[in-house]
Image (tube, coloured by chain):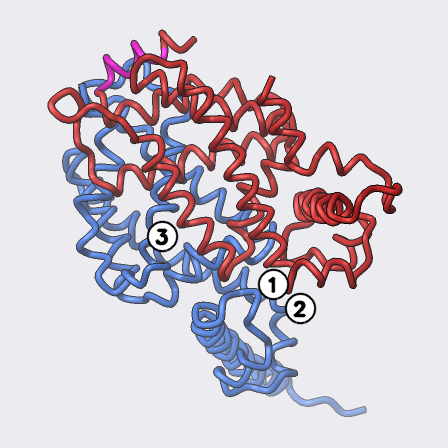
Amino acid sequence: MSEQTGRDDLALRLARLPPGRHGLPRDFVARNQRDRLAAGIIAVVAASGLNQATVAEICAAAGVSRRTFYAYFSSKEDCYLETYGRIVEYVRDAADEAAATADDWPGRVAAKLKTPLELFAANPDLARFSLVAPQRAGGPVTARYRQLMSQAVEYLCEGMPLPPATRAPSEAVGASLIGGMVALVVRELEEGRGGELPRLLPDLLELFLTPYLGRVAAAAAVEASG
Amino acid sequence: MASLPDHLQSTAVGRERLPREIVAEYQRDRILLAATGVFAEHGYPGATIDQIVAAAHVGVGSFYEHFENKEACFIAAYDRVAASVRGAVIAASAEPGLWSERLVAGLRALLEAIEADPAAARLALVEVHTAGEAVLAHHARHLEEVADVLRVGRSQGGASVGLPQSLEFATAAGLSWYLQERIAAGAAGRANTLLPELLEIVAEPYLVA
């Protein structure tokens, strides 16, 4: 269950440790403080958004002092972006691992979509932090989010068979697809159905694959994934 | 106490009130126009009421006569832009014709509105996401409305059986996302060139076999 270990590594396991040094070696405590700050900012930003969140709230949620916060990060945006980077890396690793067992491109797309849906369903705070908050923050955080969304399209398209086996929609279609898929996920979160996100998989898969494969092949791939 | 004849009383009051309302309306419009520019330039989180009143050449007191706070001003500015673009799109697509022709006319009107006023476009499609829950609810209603209009395509295309129920919402939100990305990249001033891409996003799902 490396997936479980990875998920824990995402500051979530350590977040459950009570604050303090616990007599642990210094570098472990440092790592632990950083992880607790990651867990703290995830909780606070998920609840109130990045612009409303304060460093004091993040510190309180993490159980560390302001001084400690500023030893690691220059600002809440800095803390946000680093934590976001760790989440993206984790989701990507888990998705790579899941996709490795699929035997064709549509199967890999299904695995890559299923991974975040399951992860976010298990932890809706992570979904709010990763998909809702950065769109609402503005500035460099939203700019980073836009960049990541365009990378997500490239990631899903990796290893796609070349035309004529696939159609070649414009880049605009890819951008619209990722925007639309995220909007569907966000709508579920807003309506309190974050725990049921994996139910979106067949629709997301069909929406995404259709422009590349055509409807018949896309429908067959959705059938195969279920 | 002696009173004035009726015809003198009523007209005097009426004459005084009308211009004041017009002045107030004009002033509110001027603030909203200035606010649109300020929000587009500095972003909602960074924009201040001081910047808005300076750009509108009105006093802070006048601002608060019309708006409770920055958020209320943003919502009013968004609604003003959205109503105007909505009207233009509806008028353009109401001309009789094939579904595809009306779709092209509606999308062209949307892109023309973006190109004609990049600041308004930035306010309504980019900054709207950063201005709080209330205005996002207005935006979400517009997306739902667009989705309802697009759903007509199901009876027009050759491949409409068995499409996912969520297709139109995803298309409307995807379109909004794509435009946001283009506008953020500074492409609002040449929005008209995006018509083929918009058509591909909106119409392809109903036409592809």
Chain letter belonging to callout 2: B
Quadrant of the rendering where the N terminus of chain A is positioned: top right
Q: Is residue B77 above or below residue B109?
A: below
The red-tinted chain is A
Looking at the rendered structure, the kind of residue marked 2 is Glu
Looking at the rendered structure, the kind of residue marked 3 is Glu
Sequence-earlier tag: 3 or 1: 1
The blue-tinted chain is B
Circle 2 SS class: loop
Sequence-earlier tag: 2 or 3: 2
Give the residue pinned by disc 3.
B181
Give the residue pinned by disc 2.
B68
Chain letter belonging to callout 3: B
Circle 3 SS class: helix
Residue at the limit of the structure toward the front, as seen here: A25
- What residue span does the magenta drawing correspond to? A214-222
Number of callouts = 3
Give the residue pinned by disc 1.
B71
Q: Label 2 vs label 3: CA separation?
A: 31 Å
Left or right for A185, reference A63: left
